[in-house]
Image (cartoon, rainbow, N blue to C red):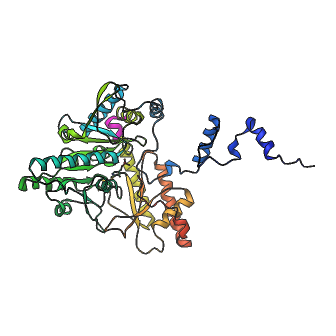
């Protein structure tokens, strides 16, 4: 005789001993629950939900760090309970922030002692850097008795969205140089027609989000220097080195893009990208202390001590500052170089493997200065597109490779892009290469993906 099923009440009575109530109940998702649950139940519930997220190491769209050494994880875990902004209580953390800024200023060839800020990422650093450009421009105009009501900022269509965001939030006219079908970065001839006496600055990118190449920063600098000498128009440049700031100094040390160039007044870099720290850290570095306008600094009496802040956020954790310092002292110059060279090596061999499939064109050449990534597009004559390849690859092997269109006027060009980071070893990169070939073979045999499958593709450029 079969045993009778347990009733819901009977199961619940056993719950305390063998299980937890969320095996039978949905997760709280609208109101704060009337009563809580045990710590173990809460942890298990969240752990189960997280299974539905993607695997960070298979996310080949992101520039952001997905792995750090266990010792770094420990430094992070042990400082999760300190508030970075409380400099009075945590003066050594504040000192470590300053050490990081000094090291970066040195790496970027600042001519002397300077200043900077720890930020939440490059977006906050860019907002602060661009605000400094606006403030300095206004001060120069006021001193000359000229109007200050129509500031503009010049940059290319290859920038990250944060630059347009800055313009909208802080009331500056964006003057955006459009891209062209075979030109995905900008140079002096592009910015020239857009610059006038209302230009607060030019923003140039070192390592674009789209293809990983750099704007012609040296050429733009030379043009701005000529403008200054020939026409008395002093237009500063900010370099958005969100990704490139930790790549170029190690892979292309002789390439001049930083404070070695006269008009470069400020630089941002994301610690959480090729600085190799988990998300939540960016940096802004000025060429000289005077490039940070004094009235953007807030002095306050905090917990009994006079403190200076130059941030958009206030309270935040100390962990990522300490993690950045950990990487600086753990890796040093040769460690960063080793990691960047290994990523470049793996990116090159993956690019060759993808080229050998015979279906794709690689964007750029091995001689280009570029972030360690592979950007590629299908050659002509396919009845499926890059979005289909991305969807097929995701459904066959779970790789998250983005497909996206370029900004105007190259919006008809579709691209796929793979970030080759520390976690994509030679063996994984080879597997990925053959998975791409396999995805193409499947599409050749069965035709393009169904519209509903294409919806799952990652269609932004990654972060
Ligand atoms: C060139 C560039 N600038 C700015 C950003 C924004 O950086 P963050 O995510 O650190 O705020 C990114 C992010 O991908 C980027 O690639």
The residue depicted at 64 percent of the width and 35 percent of the height is 38
The location of residue 167, given as percent across then percent down, is: 28, 55
Question: Where is 337 relative to 218, above or below?
Answer: above
Residue 331's x, y, as percent?
36, 35
**Residue 16 painted magenta:** no
Q: Is residue 241 above or below residue 150?
A: above
Number of numbered discs:
0
Residue 261 shows up from this direction? no
**394 or 301, which is in the foreground?**
301
Name the outermost residue toward the right. 1
What stretch of residues is rendered in magenta?
A: 331-337
| The magenta stretch spans residue 336 | yes
Q: Is residue 163 above or below residue 115?
A: below
Residue placed at 24% from the left, 53% from the top?
Answer: 203
| Quadrant in which residue 22 is drawn | top right
| 56 left or right of 271 in image | right
Q: Is residue 403 in sight in this rendering? A: yes
Q: Residue at x 43, y 75 (%)?
A: 381
Determine whether, in the image, residue 44 is placed left or right of residue 335: right
Residue 105 in picture, x, y percent from top left: 25, 38
Q: What percent of the width, then of the height, locates residue 202? A: 21, 54
Q: Main secondary structure of the magenta part?
A: helix
Determine the image quadrant of residue 453: bottom right
């Amino acid at each position: 005789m079969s045993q009778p099923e347990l009733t819901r009440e009977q199961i619940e009575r056993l719950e305390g001993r063998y299980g937890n109530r969320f095996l039978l109940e949905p997760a709280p998702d609208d109101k704060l629950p009337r009563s809580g649950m045990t710590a173990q139940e809460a942890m298990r519930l969240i752990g189960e939900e997280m299974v539905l997220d993607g695997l960070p190491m298979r996310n080949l769209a992101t520039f952001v760090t997905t792995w750090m050494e266990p010792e770094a994880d420990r430094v992070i875990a042990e400082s999760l309970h300190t508030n970075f902004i409380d400099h009075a209580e945590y003066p050594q953390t504040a000192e470590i922030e300053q050490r990081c800024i000094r090291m970066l200023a040195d790496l970027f060839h600042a001519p002397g002692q300077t200043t900077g800020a720890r930020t939440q990422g490059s977006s906050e650093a860019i907002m602060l850097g661009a605000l400094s450009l606006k403030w300095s421009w206004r001060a120069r105009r006021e001193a000359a008795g000229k109007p200050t009501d129509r500031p503009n900022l010049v940059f290319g269509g290859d920038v990250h969205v944060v630059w347009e965001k800055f313009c909208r939030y802080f009331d500056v006219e964006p003057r955006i140089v459009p891209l062209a079908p075979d030109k995905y970065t900008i140079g002096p001839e592009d910015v020239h027609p857009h610059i006038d006496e209302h230009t607060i600055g030019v923003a140039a990118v070192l390592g674009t989000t789209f293809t990983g190449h750099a704007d012609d920063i040296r050429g733009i600098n030379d043009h701005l220097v000529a403008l200054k000498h020939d026409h008395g128009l002093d237009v500063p440049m900010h370099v958005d080195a969100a990704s490139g700031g930790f790549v170029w100094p190690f892979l292309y040390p002789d390439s001049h893009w930083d404070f070695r160039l006269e008009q470069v007044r400020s630089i941002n870099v994301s610690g959480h990208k090729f600085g190799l720290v988990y998300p939540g850290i960016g940096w802004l570095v000025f060429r000289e202390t005077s490039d940070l306008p004094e009235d953007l600094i807030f002095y306050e009496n905090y917990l009994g001590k006079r403190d200076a802040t130059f941030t958009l956020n206030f309270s935040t954790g100390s962990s990522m500052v300490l993690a950045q310092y950990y990487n600086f002292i753990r890796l040093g110059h040769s460690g960063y170089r080793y990691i960047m060279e290994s990523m470049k090596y793996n990116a090159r061999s993956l690019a060759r493997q993808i080229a050998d499939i015979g279906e794709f064109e690689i964007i750029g050449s091995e001689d280009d200065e570029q972030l360690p990534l592979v950007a590629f597009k299908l050659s002509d004559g396919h009845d499926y597109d890059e979005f289909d390849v991305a969807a097929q690859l995701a459904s066959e092997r779970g790789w998250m490779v983005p497909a996206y269109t370029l900004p105007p006027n190259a919006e008809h060009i579709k691209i796929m892009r793979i970030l080759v980071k520390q976690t994509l070893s030679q063996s994984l990169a080879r597997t990925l290469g053959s998975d791409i070939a396999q995805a193409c073979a499947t599409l050749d045999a069965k035709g393009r993906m169904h519209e509903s499958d294409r919806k799952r593709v990652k269609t932004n450029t990654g972060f």
